[in-house]
Image (tube, rainbow, N blue to C red):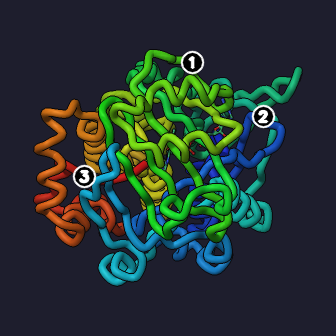
Amino acid sequence: MASSRNVIIAGAGIGGLSAALMLAQSGFRVTLLEQAERLSETGAGIQLSPNATRILIALGLGERLRADVFVPEAVAIKTASGGRLARIPLGEAAERRYGAPYWAIHRGDLQTALLDAVQANPDIVLRLGTKVENFVEHAKGLSVACRRGAFAADEHGIALIGADGLWSALRSRLKHPAPQFRQRTAWRALVPVESVEEEFRAPEVQLWLGRNAHVVHYPVKSGTLINIVAIVNDNWAQPGWAAEGEREELLAHFSPWSWCLPVREFLSVPDRWLKWALYDMPPLNVWGDGPVTLLGDAAHPMLPFLAQGAAMAIEDAAVLADNLARTPDDPAAAIRRYERARRKRTAQVQQAARGNGRIYHLPAAEAVLRNLFLRVAGGKLLLRRYNWLYDWRTAPPGTTVRPGALPRLQAGED
Ligand SMILES: Cc1cc2nc3c(=O)[nH]c(=O)nc-3n(C[C@H](O)[C@H](O)[C@H](O)COP(=O)(O)OP(=O)(O)OC[C@H]3O[C@@H](n4cnc5c(N)ncnc54)[C@H](O)[C@@H]3O)c2cc1C
């Protein structure tokens, strides 16, 4: 019986929690090891496109999440000076087209919904304060060496999934290169909806494009808070989520010569900003070895300019569980099929996200062409250009990427 088999997951982020739930649903036991002593709410918003919400709903989390999400009506794309470029319909239009909704959610709400489901599942053991350090394969599977405070501990299983994020220890253990800094910093803040002017409260994702910087904002927490992300070209490369940023330093990137007053005033509202240096890496040709593999940011860290990092981790989890369920007695073969099914799609998304980063921050002369394209294309055509991304469904390995999908200019969002 598959349920007597234990799969070990390193990392209880969105990818690890999703994988644990989907593996348990597929009949496996799961040991989920997380280095943090507790899973705290990281205060930031996240967009969940239909390719991800479809999976979360199938997992049974739809009703729970609907209580917290905000459904944006559109992505409104604007220039730094306030000109309107395009309005990509989301809301009901996206749900009708893709058969699943487009949501904006507070990351903490998503994490709590996943965590509650994990804790309610008798086939999943979550061990907090447990750092995965190494593994050895043997005839009966593998042993995973961990550290709990001052103590060393071992866990045993049939497979090991490294869902341990951007700075994955397991990816280093597999001798893959480290992520590369991309000269961009994301500044993030959350403010009460009533603290911003009306234009910034609109029920949509708004994307403002300027030279060397862009701003994205949208409501979260059922529309009570506005999540703001301002991304600037910068050489500040410090890894981590929690660095505090000074408002004046951020505003220096938004000169009054290029940026209209309403945006500058909007960016002046938050008292507290957190900074996040942006890294990604070229796609890996090989992810894992034997019964060991990577998932989510550990496998394919990407820039946030397509709002797809968490979505790809959720897709990974679905494909992994599907493949392990097909051949539970041969986890290594299942894992190789999973990697084959995911490599091309995640590489396309990494590449498209990087492309958006260039397009969003173009200097004035080149921005003229971009803006013309966005104005002429119009929202419906721009939405169709996302079909390859949002219309994805778990399918037999090798057929998960639609033929002819060409992720070129994606007028997307963070
Ligand atoms: C500015 C910004 C905006 C973004 N916006 C979006 C968005 O709108 N939509 C979207 O889909 N994505 C977005 N993303 C990307 C998304 O946040 C990530 O891709 C996603 O959270 C990755 O999930 P993960 O589970 O792979 O990794 P993480 O969330 O990093 O989780 C990894 C976990 O592993 C644990 N861990 C690490 N090492 C070990 C170890 N050795 N042993 C045990 N545990 C360990 C960590 O503590 C952590 O809990 C954004 C990212 C940024 C920076």
The one nearer the camera, 166 or 265, is: 265
> Quick one: SS at disc 2?
loop
> Quick one: SS at disc 1?
loop
Q: Position of residue 120 (x, y in %)?
A: 79, 67
Question: Label 3 amino acid?
Answer: Gln
The answer to whether 160 appears left or right of 215 in the picture is: right
Residue at image position (66%, 26%) is 243
Query: Any atom of ligand 1 within 8 Å of the CB at mark 3?
Result: no
**Residue receiving disc 2:** 130
Q: Position of residue 266 (x, y in %)?
A: 55, 47
Who comes first in sequence, dot 3 or dot 2? 2
Seen in the picture, residue 154 relative to 50 is either above or below; the reply is above
In three-dimensional space, the C-alpha distance between marks 3 and 1, rounded to whole angstroms, equals 28 Å
Residue at image position (49%, 58%) is 47
The answer to whether 239 appears left or right of 326 in the picture is: right
How many numbered discs?
Answer: 3
